[in-house]
Image: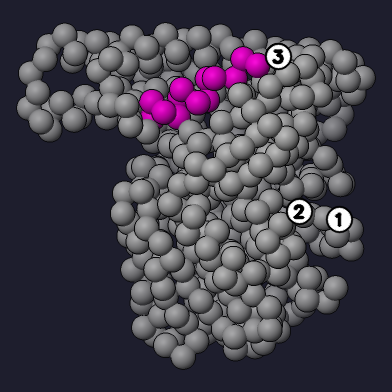
Amino acid sequence: MKKIFDDVINNIPEYKEFLTVEEMDASSKKLAEEFPEIVELFEMGRTRDNHPLYCLKIGNGSNNALMFGCPHPNEPIGAMMLEYFTRELAENKDLRDELDYTWYIVKSWDADGTKLNENWFKGPFTLYNYARNFFRPAGHQQVDWTFPIDYKNLHFHDTIPETKAMMDLIDKIKPKFIYSLHNAGFGGVYWYISRETREIYDDMRNAAKKQGIPLNLGEPEAPYCVAFDPAIYQDLGIRQNYDYLEKYGISNPESVIKVGTCSADYAKEVCGAFTLLTELPYFYDKRINDLSPSDITRKDAVLKSMEFSQEADIFIKETLNSGIQYMDKKNPFRLALEAFTDNDESNEATKKMVNENPDFAKIATVAEKFDNLLISKFYKMLSYGLLVRANEIELLKMEKDNEDDSEKKLILQKAFNNAEERLKELSELLEKEIDYEVVPIKKLVSIQLECGLLVADYLNRN
């Protein structure tokens, strides 16, 4: 690691909270005013709610690099990294010269969705508070999964405005390097990259080790992930999902897949861009990188996880449907839940894969067992949070409009109460079962930035 990069990492502040969209926009405007010779702020498009999508252009290097935060709006770690990095770039000529890129930086790509997460951005950082104030849109409304694609029988062209704005930017600047700033909720650190870069794997893992954050060595995020090395995976586009469903018995994968492809896939086609994702946890438990054997096979652990998830989805669907006639068709929490519980065919493919693939017959590691039996429950808790909010938003609207419909209020309130009770029950169970730590924001920003600097530098040298 070069000394100039070490100095940049060591100067990251002790952030205690995440910034709101308004705070980030104000900060970007201030930076452009302070450094007019180096920083340009421009509006690259508008969100569906007509919020301006701001992009910072910094420096004048020989290659273009694109970084964006909040491609998923519940993932603001990258936005904080960009908050720090943009100012550091503006103030630090040596850093700009060393990296030799022209930087295009979007702090909050899904600005509308980010606003729906802001109630947990200032803490307290607990499993319950995160889930209770969580929002993540349905796949067909996610800014990084509505890029157009034609693959076999899949034809997706229902691109949303935020995605179109990013497509136009990629077409215009043709970046050499893209940093797509995601993060997981729970677990450890892992990466997605466009192609093998073995020379820097140890350096990337060391960035996590230096901060004392474990690698995620449990189950991969999707059953079709290709591991290049421990915790380092080939990046994902929608083609892999399609081929996986097709391989395991789904005759019409295009009817199951309701989304397009992603920026990494699109930019690879447009200009051969190299994309990096560094996935980081808000919370972790040391079991996530324990490779010792557990007392259960990997297959049984996965099937138990699926059984819990399917039972939870039945409750979610029944509770949602009990008041759905009173919900706005554009209620974002309703739309998300309808998408997240519509996975029967995908589940069948996974069951077939688990039964056929000999890797799942072996004894699960402690990490794999922990991932399947506890972390999967944490992620289901987030759907309970969405269910609470789907009803809450309608009740608040009734209150605001002075709407006097006692039957509607009674039904929505009952669904709200049932969802909140289920959320609290699961939250209390997980608080007992998981010995988690909240990872300081500074550590997360450090890992994400160091990995970005490593890859940007590597691409310049190769």
> Do the CB atoms of the residues marked 1 and 2 lie less than 8 Å apart?
yes
Q: Residues within 10 Å of mark 1 (few under 14, many from 20)?
A: few
From the image, give the main secondary structure of the stretch colored magenta: helix
User: Is 222 left or right of 312, judged from the image as shown?
Assistant: right
Residue 196 shows which numbered tag? Answer: 1
Which sits in the foreground, 13 or 18? Answer: 18
Residue 193 shows which numbered tag? Answer: 2
Measured from the top left, where is residue 282 in percent x and y? 56, 44
Q: Amino acid at mark 2?
A: Ile
Q: Is residue 181 above or below residue 244?
A: below
Could you say whether the residue bearing mark 2 is in a helix, strand or loop? strand
Q: Which of the marked residues, 2 or 3, is nearer the chain's N terminus?
A: 2
Q: Quadrant of the N terminus?
A: bottom right
Q: Is residue 334 above or below residue 307?
A: below
Q: Quadrant of the C terminus?
A: bottom right
Q: Amino acid at mark 1?
A: Glu
Measured from the top left, where is residue 81 in percent x and y? 55, 62
| Residue at position x 89%, y 63% in the image | 199
Q: Which residue is mark 3?
A: 348
Which sits in the foreground, 255 or 376? Answer: 255
Which sits in the foreground, 374 or 324? Answer: 324
Measured from the top left, where is residue 108 in percent x and y? 46, 57
Residue 392 shows which numbered tag? Answer: none
Q: Which residues are magenta?
A: 333-345
